[in-house]
Image (cartoon, helix red, strand yellow):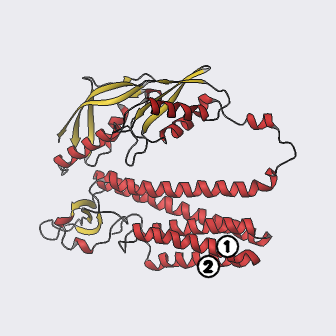
Amino acid sequence: MELVPKVPSERVAQGLQWAAAGFILALAASCGVYGALVFVAGAGTFFLLRRTLSAADLRQEGALDRFECIAALVARAIAVTALVAFALGGTFARVFAMASFACAIGLTVVTLLRDRKRARFFERVYAGDDPEFRIERDDEARGFELLPPALSGTLTDAVIAHVSATSNYRTNGPRPLARVMRSFSKMRARLSKRRRTLTMTVVGTSAAWTLVLAGPFMLVRSQPPVARAASVAPACVDAVPYFEERLQSIPNVGRATLIAHGTSGEVVYVPKAGSKASFELDAEVLETARAIPCRDKLTLTIAQPRYVAFDVSAELAIEEGANETAVQRDAEEQVRALFQPDAHALDTQHFGFGATEKTFGYRVRHALRHVSGVKAVKLVVDGADREVPLEPTDFPTLKSLSIGVVR
């Protein structure tokens, strides 16, 4: 009776930390006169990450994902130390630094694979596809306070329990194993946050390694070719995702996009919730868009969004044993969250303009199907079960929402 994936012993987690200390000392020793700088960089990174992790993740000791938390910390610390050692050390130090970086990448991959396996296990359990496990309210489990949390740094309100085939529910009942959150979307968000952090670590350190390795070949020549440097910029129509990212980073801008028309283009945006469009905000958005580098400069203007309100109603068929009130509440929260005019979402991505969405309806169905306890969805948009096409400047809004629950 093991939760997936199998939890390593505390000795393994402690061994990872000792291994990180050994790598940092070895990398520092291989750099000779620069060893002190390498040690300070590595040890400083390790203890800074550990302090941050201790405040956010290790506060609840004994969490079942403690190995993944420590593995992520160790991988980042070794990657940074190896990068500094490669930049300052000699031939031997560089070879050892590259081997250390490969170990850090391998540890990151192991962590991502374990989290992927854990996420799939939770998906089966919350969907009721694994008869050996079930989610119970924590107040129904005696001594639940003594159970370890399944994910560190989380506020739990339920337990995951093992259901024995030979036990009687009225006598023995399910055996609680760990504390969890009743909302699967919140559990998945916790795992997604760590996945994004590890992925960005790999991307960032790999980019830094690329710069260090390519540095000798990128030394400034006497006359750098101006025409070649100018041709590196992409076409504006190919840089729409970059336009969106830059524009949506402006304070008070929720969603934005670029609509290209040959040699001209329109910039359309909606303000964040609680903010309003203004002449000053229009000017800031347009100035930012015109400053974004691309090969074929477009003549840009501000276009006003067309808000399209939808009547959304859904009938949810729920699984046996699912709480109707909780499912309906979670479903309404998931759907209403889709319409928040914000590009930075935690659980699910919010709606964008028609230039990106193309049609309306599929994302609502996807969100409802992933609500814990839902096994089937019947969605009606504006009185019909269909996909509604969107124009490039159309931005979906919620006119009314009605969600029913049936067994």
Q: Of the residues under marks 1 and 2, which one precedes in the sequence?
A: 2
Which numbered tag is attached to residue 38? 1
Q: Which residue is pictured at 27% across the width and 31% down the height?
A: 379
Q: How many marks?
A: 2
Where is residue 365 drawn, in percent x and y? Answer: 33, 36
- Left or right of 139? Residue 3 is right
Identify residue for label 2: 22
Where is residue 306 drawn, in percent x and y? Answer: 38, 23
Specify the quadrant of the image occupied by residue 318.
top left
- Left or right of 133? Residue 395 is right
- Left or right of 158? Residue 44 is right
**Residue type at the position of mark 1:** Val
Q: Quadrant of the C terminus?
A: top left
Q: Which residue is pictured at 27% across the width and 44% down the height?
A: 333
Where is residue 209 drawn, in percent x and y? Answer: 68, 58
> Marks 1 and 2, how far apart in space?
13 Å
Where is residue 62 drawn, in percent x and y? Answer: 37, 74
